[in-house]
Image (cartoon, helix red, strand yellow):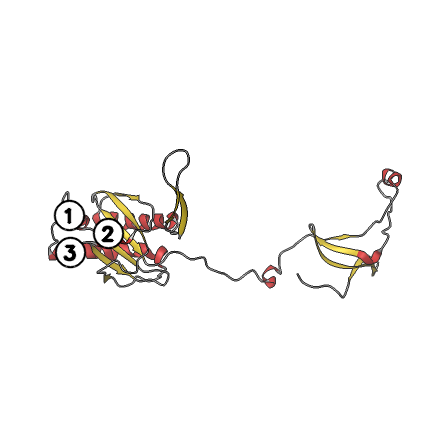
Amino acid sequence: MKFLAFEPGRGVRPAHFEARSQLPVAAACVVANGVRETLSALLAAPLEVRLFEPLVPSPTAWQAIFAGALAYRVRGPASDAAVVLRPEDAGALAHAAFGEPGGSDRALSAVERRVVERAVAAVSGALAPVCGFSQMPALEACSGCSGFVSYFELELVGASCARIGIALTREPTSEVRATVRLEDLGDVEVELAVLLPAGERPAGLLCALEPGAVLAPVNLQRAQLRLGARTLLTGEAGARGGRAALRINQDFAHE
């Protein structure tokens, strides 16, 4: 989505439109916490995760993100996601899995690559909040950035100092849900009032009113049944079975 933004500086600043991700930061935080817990358990060491705000990379940025990186795709009904590891980050994760410090951007050995793939498969379960799957999907190799629209990164601090990128194929959309039905409110109790028009009365009569005084309405055919400040029904006031009653007019209609 395009948002209006202003160039940095003081005074009159030029305005422009820029693309920003609609992914809620709260959703990315849930993913980050899931990744932290999973990797902390796998590496048997405490980890901290620093979250970078979701963004919409330019085509050039997408190419840079995926250039030479290991990327694995996870499919879901709400969105597909890719876990992206640049060479130096994949090396750092592999070294941490073997209890070795540091990392390198050299090509991974077959064993190291397998370890990294298993780690990615484990953390892919944390993508459920943004992908919408209920069961762990199969992990697929991803060869390019085509189809992805938003991106955020997680920086691991602890046994593994690496960054894990998360790319998504779809931005969140507003869902239109069914409205509350009248029958859903059948057991809700509300307070009703009947309003009877009193017509015009001398001000002196109003000043003389005391508890127990009777003020007859001027027109019993204009009674209103009200809920708060809203008139629900109109009808005629009277008595039935020795009790005050309101007979509803035939012209009542639901609003």
Measured in 3D between alpha carbons, the distance from the residue under mark 2 to the one under mark 3, in whole angstroms, is 19 Å
Density class for disc 3 (Cα within 10 Å; few <14, some 14-19, many ≥20) is some
> Helix, strand or loop at disc 2?
helix
Q: Nearer the viewer, mark 1 or mark 2?
A: 2
Tag 2 residue: 65
> Helix, strand or loop at disc 3?
helix
Question: Which residue is at the front of the view, 111 or 233?
Answer: 233
Apparent side of residue 227 relative to residue 90 in the rendered image (left or right): right
The residue depicted at 25 percent of the width and 49 percent of the height is 164
Please determine whether, in this image, residue 255 is positioned above or below residue 53. Answer: below
Question: Which residue is at the front of the view, 9 or 173?
Answer: 9
The residue depicted at 24 percent of the width and 51 percent of the height is 65
Q: Which quadrant would the C terminus be assigned to in this image?
A: bottom right
Question: Which residue is at the front of the view, 175 or 3?
Answer: 3
Residues at discs 1 and 2 in contact (Cβ within 8 Å): no
> Helix, strand or loop at disc 1?
helix
Measured in 3D between alpha carbons, the distance from the residue under mark 1 to the one under mark 2, in whole angstroms, is 22 Å
Residue 244 in view here: no
Where residue 253 sits: x, y (%)?
70, 64
Tag 3 residue: 113
Where residue 186 sits: x, y (%)?
62, 61
Where residue 109 sits: x, y (%)?
11, 55
- Which disc, if any, is residue 95? 1
